[in-house]
Image: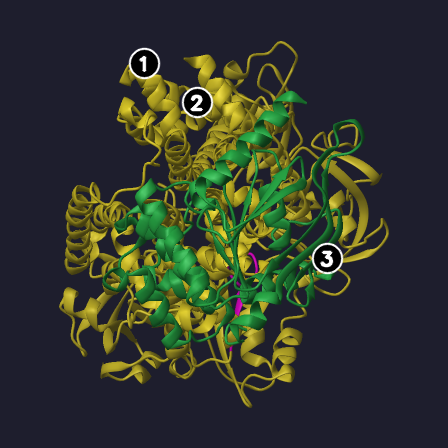
């Protein structure tokens, strides 16, 4: 039987082409993902092992403002004395102290090189030989004077800096210019991942990032033959309270594990989309096998007539599917490996540096590729194979073709209706539950999707009948025939449209939610921010006090208030507080006072948002005990309550009150209102006041809105990209269905040509059929997607103030137009072959 | 044209082929399907083309009807020379001037009987002549089945719809390719009767390829083809006469 199956596969090469393509694409997606993440994981692991190669033990300390047990402030980090003691331990060859923090390098235009959160600076720590083992200098030498720095090679080349050039470097304080003393390469993972690294002379780095004389971390290298664990055991007792030591191997392992975790979440997301693509592929495969079986009715009946059992017939169809699945998986796997290679180099060209490493093809990836490809094909071929087994032997004698019946659709429709109803009930129920309804909605979505897919053949007739008059009127006879043809085989039309509907459901759902969220955030921003500019560090860290003062004094500034993140213990319970400038804060943010007056912040008072006030039982005029971070306490009045605001903590306090108690204030952003509002000149004035610091970004209101909107758009674009594979397979499905239709209706098309339908209109007829099927699928998908988006929106409604569902009509319109275009595109080849059909042979086909 | 006086029409030519040749392949494998055939199909005449299989009778019909290209010679439908036409013009010619009746009925299953009948006019974007259509439908006797789909009709009824479709647009000439090949003898006789009536009563011109002497006996004139050449012609044939003539060719063929 297997040999017959193989022969049939070879005989139907062309018709199986789309099936092979669909399985191939799905498998390529799966294996590409696996190979890519394996390769990446391997490269990163090697990288981290390499960067810790010479590290026997690493010591790190944590910043703390808590006074120690003796009441005195503890030493900040590691003192030179501690390092000396470590150096004296048996087996230790060298100890290198490190201190690091943010350091942004300006390019010659004053713009920051890199993306803010990956710009670091550290100290150049030469050993006795004058070299720092962590850095290989390709040009010049390490910084030995206060005014010198060294840069990693990629940063230097991006800024077009050469040794001897003056380079502007921003740390958390003001910008300074340094002489470039050297350019180096390093195994540092962050640098290899595309970050920038500045090396300072040690005392400069200490002053910038900690305190003179102290280090934050230390790396210990061992004498040959010494045990890392032994050294660790001996070093640990020498360390101050806030320090922790680990061996280099441990660190490398930890890092590897972390990378693995990150990669596996990427992996899972990609695989989820691959699963969608494969699921869509099932419809296409199933269609193809159904048609192959229908075409071979006589042949299969003959097999039955000469004595083949039902089971043998079924098995022969399944064997065919197996062959197709194997071949497609093999091609798909090769394609997937290519995809992985391409993806890696694509990442490189987007600026994300990926460490080099060999291509890793794990047995798991191979097994997954073949397993998935074969199993999907077999699942899809199962129903058609059952149908094949049911062909009665007598069908071999009759000349009538097996026609698609509507009879068995009754059962199908009942099942579909039940599923759809359960699903819809789940979705509506979940939406009614609100916040906790997500799971119910998820289940409901699944049920209704399955239900709709089952029901789609039934839906196709009435829905397409609605557009039939339009088709008749606009496209005449070609339109009329196209519409009628598209509902001729409801099962096939349904399966084809389903594939598109699934894709469109997801696309529409995600878009609607994305746009709705974007709009809500946008509204929140515009409603709450009165300031013209928001100033923040590009690194996402805190602004230096000098920057805050500079902004307050900048010309044209009418009001400026920091949004200093503080932590107060009020009446024994902790609360996050915003340190603000009284008087100015209400001019830069829309704070709605509920009771009292924000003016009281000028005195010994705090303001509390009304929700917190209610839960804590405070009223305006109450007196509370506030404990600051330095453990000092004060009795303060509740001067005002205000409406909860996304941009302000539950408690407001003046910077004047909180300032003296915080040695190291953290100010993520400063809001500034200016005379004349947002103008180029005003922005420039702020930039100038900040000393043209590349590490500080001055954002106007539009920038703030873009910050959030941009994030949502990027996320949507990534989703679109990932769903593209499923959509491509859906398009292949349309091509497949049309090719089948053209093939089956050769005789009809031949007759139409004979009685005078010209080639152009034959093409138009096929094209319109494709458009009708595609748009039908798209409409179903858009409907379901919108419904789902509404339901999911209901569950997040409570957590977003001012939530309102926004229908992205323009985008939905674009989706539908694209679906139509997809139809036109998919029909290109089938329409051509229909138009080229030889009339005489077509008419004679029997 | 059908309104012309009967007498005049009898002498006018609806389709004309002269020196018509059709050759498949080249060199050694060359097959001559039609060899210098010259023939007239007169208006208002029912012509049958007969011959053993492989004689070229279908090819002759296809070439004259603008369905197939020919190697040399000329074909005219009315005043139009087919050899000079491009595909688009040929399609238009078939649409406006030629009707077809196929062996396998070839109706569209998605359309009703009436829609199938008016399909050529729909394609041309013309309104059917109501009175003429009524005449045709009355003649083929399907008035009560017009809104049925082909699958609900018997083979004979389907072929009658096909005849009506060919007649409905009042073409200059109708070609039939074994129109009774898929029918039992009673249904076949009915269909042939309609075809003859369309010639007698409506003045239609019909050319039919057949291998059935009984079918041929309905025609006014039979042309006999063998090996791509016209070998004989018979006016007002009878089934027996045609059968005898065919037997004679067969015997000749076997002897040579």
Q: Does residue A539 belong to the magenta stretch?
A: yes
Q: Which residues are magenta?
A: A533-543
Residue A190 percent location from the top left of the image: 61, 40
The quadrant in which the C terminus of chain A is found is top left
Viewer-closest of B251 and B72: B251
| Label tally | 3
Residues tagged 1 and 2 counted as in contact (Cβ below 8 A): no
**Mark number displayed over residue A320:** 2
Q: Is residue A726 visible?
A: no
**What residue is pinned by disc 3?**
B83
Mark 1 vs mark 2, CA separation in Å: 16 Å
The quadrant in which the N terminus of chain A is found is top left
**In the figure, what tint was chain B given?**
green
Write down the quadrant of residue A338 in the picture. Answer: top right
Residue B150 percent location from the top left of the image: 32, 52
Helix or strand or loop: what does disc 2 sit on? helix
Q: Nearer the viewer, mark 1 or mark 2?
A: 1
Chain letter for mark 2: A
Mark 1 vs mark 3, CA separation in Å: 54 Å
Viewer-closest of A207 and A761: A761
Helix or strand or loop: what does disc 1 sit on? loop
Q: Is residue B67 above or below residue A650?
A: above
Viewer-closest of A700 and B240: B240
Residue B177 percent location from the top left of the image: 50, 47
**Which residue lies at the image location 28% right of the left edge and 74% below the top edge?**
A607
**What residue is pinned by disc 1?**
A308
Write down the quadrant of residue A695 in the picture. Answer: bottom right
Left or right relative to A465: residue A580: right
Chain letter for mark 3: B
């Amino acid at each position: 039987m297997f040999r017959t199956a193989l022969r049939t596969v070879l005989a139907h090469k062309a018709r199986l082409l789309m099936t092979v393509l669909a399985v191939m694409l799905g498998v390529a997606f799966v294996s590409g993902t696996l190979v890519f993440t394996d390769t990446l994981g391997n490269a990163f692991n090697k990288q981290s092992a390499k960067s810790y190669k010479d590290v026997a033990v690493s010591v790190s300390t944590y910043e703390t403002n808590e006074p120690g047990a003796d009441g005195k402030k503890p030493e900040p980090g590691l003192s030179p004395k501690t390092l000396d003691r470590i150096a004296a331990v048996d087996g230790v060859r060298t100890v290198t102290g490190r201190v690091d923090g943010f350091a942004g390098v300006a390019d010659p235009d004053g713009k920051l090189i890199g993306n803010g959160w990956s710009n670091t600076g550290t100290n150049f720590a030469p050993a006795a030989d004058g070299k720092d083992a962590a850095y290989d200098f390709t040009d010049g030498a390490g910084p030995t004077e206060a005014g010198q720095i060294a840069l990693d090679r990629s940063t230097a080349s991006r800024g077009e800096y050469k040794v001897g050039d003056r380079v502007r470097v921003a740390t958390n304080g003001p910008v300074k210019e340094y002489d470039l003393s050297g350019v180096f390469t390093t195994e540092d993972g962050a640098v290899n991942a595309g970050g920038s690294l500045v090396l300072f002379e040690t005392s400069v780095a200490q002053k910038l990032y900690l305190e003179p004389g102290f280090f934050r971390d230390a790396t210990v290298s061992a004498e040959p033959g010494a045990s890392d664990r032994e050294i660790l055991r001996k070093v640990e007792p020498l360390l101050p309270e806030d320090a922790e030591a680990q061996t280099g191997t441990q660190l490398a392992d930890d890092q590897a594990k972390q990378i693995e975790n990150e990669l596996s979440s990427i992996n899972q997301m990609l695989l989820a989309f691959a699963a969608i693509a494969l699921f869509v592929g099932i419809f296409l495969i199933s269609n193809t096998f159904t048609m192959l079986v229908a075409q071979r009715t006589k042949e299969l009946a003959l097999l039955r007539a000469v004595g083949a059992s039902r089971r043998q017939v079924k098995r022969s169809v399944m064997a065919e599917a197996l062959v197709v699945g194997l071949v497609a998986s093999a091609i798909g796997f090769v394609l997937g490996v290519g995809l992985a290679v391409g993806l890696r180099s694509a990442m490189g060209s987007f600026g994300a540096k990926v460490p080099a490493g060999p291509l890793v093809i794990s047995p798991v990836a191979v097994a997954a590729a073949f397993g998935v490809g074969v199993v999907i094909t077999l699942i899809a071929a199962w129903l058609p194979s059952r149908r094949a087994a049911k062909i009665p032997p007598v069908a071999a004698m009759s000349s009538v073709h097996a026609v698609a019946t509507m009879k068995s659709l009754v059962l199908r429709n009942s099942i579909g209706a039940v599923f759809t109803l359960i699903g819809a009930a789940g979705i509506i129920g979940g939406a009614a539950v609100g916040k906790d309804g997500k799971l119910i909605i998820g289940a409901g979505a699944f049920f209704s999707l399955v239900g709709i897919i089952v029901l789609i053949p039934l839906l196709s007739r009435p829905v397409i009948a609605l557009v039939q008059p339009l088709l008749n009127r606009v496209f005449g006879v070609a339109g009329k025939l196209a519409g009628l043809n598209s509902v001729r085989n409801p099962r096939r039309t349904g399966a084809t449209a389903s594939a598109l509907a699934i894709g469109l459901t997801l696309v529409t759902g995600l878009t609607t939610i994305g746009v709705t969220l974007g709009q809500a955030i946008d509204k929140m921003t515009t409603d709450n921010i009165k300031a013209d500019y928001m100033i923040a560090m590009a690194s996402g860290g805190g602004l230096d006090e000098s920057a805050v003062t500079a902004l307050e004094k900048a010309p044209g500034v009418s009001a400026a208030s920091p949004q200093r993140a503080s932590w107060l213990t009020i009446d024994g319970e902790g609360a996050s507080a915003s340190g603000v400038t009284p008087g100015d804060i209400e001019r830069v943010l829309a704070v709605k006072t509920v009771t009292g007056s924000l003016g009281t912040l000028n005195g010994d008072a705090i303001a509390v948002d009304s929700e917190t006030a209610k839960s804590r039982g405070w009223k305006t005029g109450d007196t509370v005990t506030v404990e600051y971070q330095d453990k000092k306490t004060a009795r303060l009045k509740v001067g005002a309550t205000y409406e909860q605001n996304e941009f302000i903590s539950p408690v407001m306090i003046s910077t004047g009150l909180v300032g003296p108690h915080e040695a190291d204030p953290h100010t993520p952003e400063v809001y500034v209102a200016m005379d004349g509002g947002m103008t180029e000149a005003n922005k420039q004035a702020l930039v100038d006041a900040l000393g043209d610091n590349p590490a500080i970004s001055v954002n106007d209101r539009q920038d703030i809105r873009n910050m959030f909107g941009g994030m949502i758009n990027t996320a949507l674009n990534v989703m679109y990209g990932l769903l593209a594979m499923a959509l491509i397979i859906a398009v292949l499905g349309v091509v497949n269905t049309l090719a089948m239709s053209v093939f089956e209706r050769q005789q009809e098309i031949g007759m139409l040509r004979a009685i005078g339908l010209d080639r152009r209109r034959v093409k138009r007829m096929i094209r319109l059929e494709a458009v009708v099927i595609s748009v039908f699928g798209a409409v179903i998908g858009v409907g379901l997607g919108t419904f789902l988006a509404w339901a999911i929106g209901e569950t997040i409604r409570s957590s977003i103030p001012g939530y309102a569902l926004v229908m992205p009509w323009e985008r939905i319109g674009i989706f539908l137009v694209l679906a139509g275009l997809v139809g036109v595109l998919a029909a290109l080849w089938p329409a051509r072959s229909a138009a080229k059909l030889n009339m005489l042979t077509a008419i004679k086909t029997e | 044209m059908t309104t012309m006086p009967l007498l005049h029409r009898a002498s006018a030519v609806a389709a004309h082929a002269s020196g018509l040749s059709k050759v498949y392949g080249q060199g050694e494998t060359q097959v001559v399907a039609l060899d210098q055939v010259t023939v007239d199909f007169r208006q208002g005449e029912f012509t049958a083309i007969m011959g053993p299989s492989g004689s070229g009778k279908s090819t002759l019909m296809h070439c004259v009807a603008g369905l197939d290209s020919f190697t040399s010679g000329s074909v005219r439908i009315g005043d139009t020379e087919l050899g000079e036409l491009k595909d688009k013009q040929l399609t238009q010619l078939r649409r406006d001037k030629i009707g077809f009746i196929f062996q396998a009925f070839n109706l569209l299953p998605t359309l009703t009987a009436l829609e199938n009948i008016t399909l050529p006019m729909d394609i041309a974007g013309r309104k059917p002549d109501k009175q003429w259509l009524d005449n045709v439908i009355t003649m083929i006797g399907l008035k009560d089945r017009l809104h049925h789909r082909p699958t609900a009709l018997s083979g004979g009824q389907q072929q009658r719809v096909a005849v009506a479709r060919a007649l409905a647009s009042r073409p200059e000439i109708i070609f039939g390719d074994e129109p009774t090949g898929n029918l039992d003898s009673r249904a076949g006789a009915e269909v042939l009767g309609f075809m003859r009536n369309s010639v007698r009563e409506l003045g239609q011109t019909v050319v039919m390829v057949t291998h059935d002497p009984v079918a041929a006996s309905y025609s006014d004139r039979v042309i006999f083809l063998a090996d791509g050449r016209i070998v004989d012609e018979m006016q007002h044939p009878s089934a027996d006469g045609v059968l005898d003539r065919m037997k004679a060719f067969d015997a000749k063929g076997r002897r040579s």
